[in-house]
Structures are given as structure tokens and as C-alpha cells.
Image (cartoon, rainbow, N blue to C red):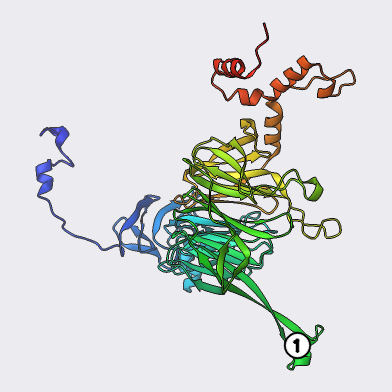
Amino acid sequence: MDGGDNGSIADGTVEELAERSAVKMIHLGEGALNVVTTVDDKYICLAGEDGAVRFYDLQFRLEAWFEDLEAGPITSVSFSAAAPNVDPSRLDFSVPDIVVGTRNAYIVGLEAIVFEEVEPEARRGTLLVQGMSDEVHGIATHPSQPYVVIASYSGALYLWDYNQKVLVMVRQFDASRLRPRCVAYEPNANYIAIGFTSGIVKVLDPSTLEDVATFKNAKEPIVDISFSPLGDMFATADADHHVAVWKLSLERIVEEEGPEAEADPMAEATIKATWIYLGRHRSHWRPITALEFGLRDDGRQTLVSVGEDRCLVEYDLDESSVGSGVVLKEPPKRIEVSAVPTAATWHPLLGTGANRDFEDRVVTANSEYKLMQWNADNKSCRRTTLGPTFGQPINKLLPLVKPSPRDPDTDAADSIPHPRLGYLAYSTCEKVVGLCKMPLDGNPNKAMGLIAHPGPISCIAVSHDSQTLVTAGGTDATVNLWQINTEVLDAAEAGSYPEPRLNEAGEAVAEDEMTPKERAEATRTRMAPFLALLEGGEGGEAVGSLEGELLPRPSS
């Protein structure tokens, strides 16, 4: 600025302003002020770190104060556009209805009339929204009800009814010692297991969120936690590359004393359930990226893990005990050469018994956007296909599960209690979540993705009826709900193939009824989605080069 009129501020130059000093200072609050605004040209509203909202007249004389909110430091104050309801006989102070936002993720509604209340509880306003005030790294859905548990780094554990959008219950831990990192529901909804960044593991009662058991067997953060399909075991993975296993012990306690009562199966007794720590095994030397329980075709439960050390490890749950610790089924199997495994799940079972299409398989995703299927017994690779290529590599795979439970009259005793559908939900490291359809064959039209969060995605969960996908954004402290519609994938897959040739009756012509030329053309149409992946598409140079190399040349 120059020294002319344009350089003056309030009729004074910069040099003159530098010499001015405060004549009077007024202390208006404890801590920093985050909100300073005027209301109806009558009041000055101040709010800040002390969690109070105060109103002054234009001479800075205190008119009203709301100091009993107990909602944390205030970050924003908004006023209704509607005129206030003025009752001169009761209150001289009147402002439009107020909405207050706080750093603890509370949104509180206030009315001016609340200032007249005597009891502090009556002056706290109405809680409109209670959100997450810190990063969210753990979510889990109820196995049979529309509930979701959310674990926040603020130390809070929230239980929400996502159908009614109602907060059912909150459990607050001391965040200085207990920051929830991951959480899981037991398949029968009898327990909730939660892992903390301090290495502590707690088992909670899902109806009250109170402690059932607490274990301190690790010093590093718990990064993953999972229950077995039958609910009698759970396992954790920590940041020090250990896998730990717990087992549920059921003890029958007879109320009457004496050996005869204990031997009588009809005697009144109670069942005492106790979680027993079996031990842990440092089965990886790089971070663990997936920890998955499975139920084999013969009814045996099994546990596998994969890590950035490019190894697949299976654990022998039958041989693992308190005395022997966690036992490996076999030495770790190296499954990658250059890529890094980023996620894993058990292949959805498409039928049981004689209707089984293939053996038990483990599906892994890697950093090169590949989906690989491994035989669960000999760990041989059965198939490698292209996975979803939306954004970053996949970091979580979840099968969609049928909502109907097992029918004891028609299903075999060793069949899985919740048959899986032919779809997988997935998340990537950043922004994108989606669905892919089984079988995994690399067809890009059988996968979809959408931007769910502006940054990293910390975890996902699928509802018990496979109709809702729950996603957490980690640092954005946000949990989103997405409706699942698999019919869109079905339509996209069907639209990727040309319509089949029909006979005079309007039915698709079977391949054995086609001429060799028609059969070759039908095969080519089925290959259309895959040929489109090559450079230049179906009629491009790459396809022509492959045909020249692989197709037999006519004899001269």
C-alpha cells in the first residue's frame, strides 16, 4: 500500500496503527473463542473451547448464558430462520432456536426459554445427533438384527439400529489406555470381541456392552479379530505379526451338592461359559493382511492368515490347546513372487455334498489387482483372474450370506449354517468399495465400484440379510450405509454377451446342434468381454497377433 488515502485504515495509516494500544480488555470466556457472531442486531453470541454459549448486548453486558451443555468444545453455532416465540411475561431475552455443534461430534438443539430453567439437567438442551469424534477403524454387524457396532479412537463403542437410525447404546472407554481398533460379533450374537491399540482384548455382553472377559497377551495394537463359524473360538492378529486364539469352555455346574447330583443329567444345573486363551504364534514376519475362519466340507473349522511376507498360513485348531499353544497345520506356504497379498476369504460354497462344484478354496487378492484361488488342502493355485481395477488394490473381501438359517429337517448336520451367495463385497485402500459376482473369471462386467469416502477406507461390514453394506472412512470419522442390489450385476453380465441364436420355437440353440462354424462363432461371442480387455479390442492388433500364433494354419 502507498501512503495515500488507499493506504489508510479507519482514517489512520499503518504507522499510526502500529502505535495504538488497547485501552480496555474484557474477559469473555475460558479458553479460545471459536464462534463470534451477532443475532438480530441486538446480541453478540460467543462460544468456544469452554463448551458454553454466551450472549452479550452491544455494550458487552452479559444477557444470557448456556454453560451446562456438557457436549464438549463448541465449533459452530447456527440460528433458525424463523422468528423467536416471544413471551414478554416470562423472559426479556429471546433469540431464534439454536443448533450447536461440538468437537465431540454432538449436535445440540437449544431454545431461549431453556435459560430460565433452574436445574442444570434441564439447561442442556436436546441432543439431536451423536456422531464419532475421532477415527473409526472397527465396525461389525449383528448376525440376525439390524444393529451395527462402531469402534472409535475416541474410546467410544456405539451400538446403532441402522434401520431406525437410532443410537441404542454407548460404552465409553478411557481413550488414554483403551482405543478400540477392531470389533467382531460372535455368529450367535452371544458376545462381542474388541481389540485395542494397547494390545488388550475384551469380550463384551452385546446386550449391555459390559465386560465378560479381559485379556492382555500382546503389547502391540490388535489389527484384526474374527470369530469361528460355530462361535466357539475367536482369533486376533496384532501389529507384531502374531496370531492368537481363544476357545470357549462350557462347564456344567449342578446346584445340588454331592456326586449323585453331579452324575444325574436331569439335575438342575447352570452352564458357565469361559473364554480360555490358547496361545499365540508369530506365523508371519511382515504385517498380517487377512485373518479368516472357515468351515470345511467335512464340518471341521479352520483358520488361515495371509501377510505381506507373501505367505499363506493354516492353523490346526484341533491340535491347538493351552499346553501346546497355537499349532500350524503345515509350514507357511509362499503364494506370491512379486505381488503382495492384500486380502483373503473362503470361497463361497456353491452347493454342498454331491452338488459341490469344486473343493474348498481360499481366495486371495494381491497388489497387482489379481484374484487367486488356492486349494485349501495342498495350497496349489487353481485359478488366477483379473479382479476389480477401480482405484487401489483390494484390502478386504466379504462374502454375501443368505438370510435364511439352516433347516435341520432338510440340511445335513455338517452343512454350513449360513450358505453363501455367489457375490463378494470388497473395499480398496482408498475411496472405492464395490461388488463382484461369482464365479471369478475376470469378466470386468461382473464387478462394480463406487466412491464411498474421500480418503482411506478403514473397514467394511455386510448386514445379516446381505442388503446393506456398511463402510467406515477412518480419518474422516464417518460411517456410511449402502443398499446392495445384485440384480444390477446380473444385468451387466448378461448385457456383456450378445443374445444367443434362437430356433423356430424361440429357444436358444444348443451347441451340439450347431455347425462347426456356428459353434466357433458362439465361442467367440462368449469371449467378447475378455477380448475387449486387450489393446485395440476384438478387432485390434493384439487379438490378430494371438490368433496368428495360436490358431492352426491351413495346410497348403
Location of residue 256 with respect to 286 vertically, above or below: below
Q: Quadrant of residue 539?
A: top right
The amino acid type, in three-letter code, at marker 1 is: Glu
Residue 39 image offset from top left, x and y in percent: 39, 51
The answer to whether residue 87 shows anywhere in this view is: no
Identity of the residue drawn at 37% across and 63% down: 63
Q: Residue furthest bottom?
A: 258
Between 51 and 263, the one nearer to me in the picture? 263
Q: Is residue 51 above or below residue 364?
A: below
Q: What is the residue that sits farthest to the top in this orientation? A: 556
The residue under the point 9% across, 43% down is 15
Residue 350 visible from this viewpoint: yes
Q: 323 or 236, which is in the foreground?
A: 323
User: In screen coordinates, is 120 left or right of 346?
Assistant: left
Neighbourhood count class around disc 1 (C-alpha, 10 Å): few under 14, some 14–19, many 20 upward: some
Image position, residue 41 (x, y; %): 37, 50
Q: Looking at this view, is 451 or 161 the one in front?
A: 451
Direction front: furthest residue: 556
Q: Position of residue 183 (x, y in %)?
A: 55, 61
Q: Which residue is mark 1?
A: 262
Assign the N terminus to one quadrant of the image. top left
Q: Residue shown at 65%/74% (left/top)?
A: 249
